[in-house]
Amino acid sequence: GESVGLHLPTLSVQEGDNSIINCAYSNSASDYFIWYKQESGKGPQFIIDIRSNMDKRQGQRVTVLLNKTVKHLSLQIAATQPGDSAVYFCAENRGGGADGLTFGKGTHLIIQP
Amino acid sequence: EAQVTQNPRYLITVTGKKLTVTCSQNMNHEYMSWYRQDPGLGLRQIYYSMNVEVTDKGDVPEGYKVSRKEKRNFPLILESPSPNQTSLYFCASSTRVTADMNTEAFFGQGTRLTVV
């Protein structure tokens, strides 16, 4: 079946370093991808999105890269801060709005002081 | 303030006792969804609704019902809860993704349900 998943369940980085969180997807027809951040005790929050007609999109301290050839998505966080500690999910939009989101299983980002 | 509000935040119930988790959004969004989150499984969609009186099954609909009588509300109903429905539940709402417009799904704070 089609799935969106992550390579690593936990990622530990030093404060100030850059973080890279990876995601693989299998539905080659997907044309819209979103990264969410979920802090403990809260619902997922939108970080950044990207359409399939783009390879890269930048936000504030975050960059999403999309490689359609190998169906791979990554989230780069620059100068990681303690507040970045959270579980990060990639989501694939199957079409429509909230109805169409398929989530990966999540990566827990841990920031070491 | 744009928000999705779920109630209750925490609920402990017994097997077979019907319950409803409410969800309300104030953004006039067309789309609303329910997800459950379980360790190691991420977020899985239960049901979704594309507009008033329009609902569809997601990936794990068994044991759940929903209704969409008004645009702002999308309650999740468990007619006869069982222990395997113990989970963390999230409601989400969004506008529609089109070729010209992206969307952002807004999530509620979550409802932690325990069925004993």
Image (tube, grey):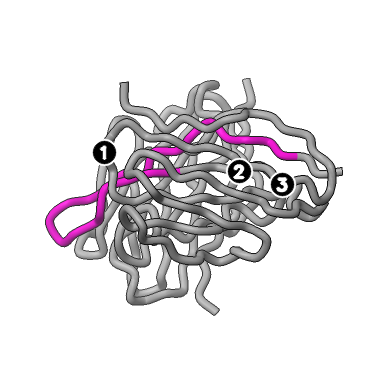
Which quarter of the figure is the N terminus of chain A placed in? bottom right
Image depth: mark 2 or mark 3 in front: 3
Residue drawn at (50%, 58%), measured in percent from left and top? Answer: B47
Task: Tell me if residue A60 comes above or below residue B95 in the rendering.
Answer: above
Residue under pointer 3: B18
Image depth: mark 1 or mark 2 in front: 1
Tag 1 and tag 2, C-beta contact below 8 Å: no
Membership of B93 in magenta stretch: yes
The disc labelled 1 sits on which kind of residue?
Asn
Q: Secondary structure at mark 2?
A: strand
Residue drawn at (78%, 40%), measured in percent from left and top? Answer: B114
Instruction: Write down the quadrant of residue B2 in the picture.
Output: top left
The answer to which of B70 and B1 lies nearer the viewer is B70
State whether the magenta stretch is mostly helix, strand or loop.
loop
The answer to which of B45 and A67 lies nearer the viewer is B45
One can see residue A31 in this view: yes
The disc labelled 2 sits on which kind of residue?
Tyr
Which quarter of the figure is the C terminus of chain A placed in? top right
Q: Chain of mark 3?
A: B
Q: Which residues are magenta?
A: B92-113
Q: CA distance from mark 3 to mark 1?
A: 29 Å
Residue under pointer 2: B89
Q: Which mark is residue B28?
A: 1
The location of residue A66, given as percent across then percent down, is 33, 60
Task: Sort mark 1 into few (<14), some (14-19) or many (20+) by Cα contacts within 10 Å.
Answer: few
Task: Sort mark 2 into few (<14), some (14-19) or many (20+) by Cα contacts within 10 Å.
Answer: many
The location of residue B23, given as percent across then percent down, is 48, 37
Q: Secondary structure at mark 3?
A: loop
The disc labelled 3 sits on which kind of residue?
Lys
Q: Residue furthest right?
A: B116
Q: Chain of mark 1?
A: B
Q: Do callouts 3 and 1 point to residues on the same chain?
A: yes
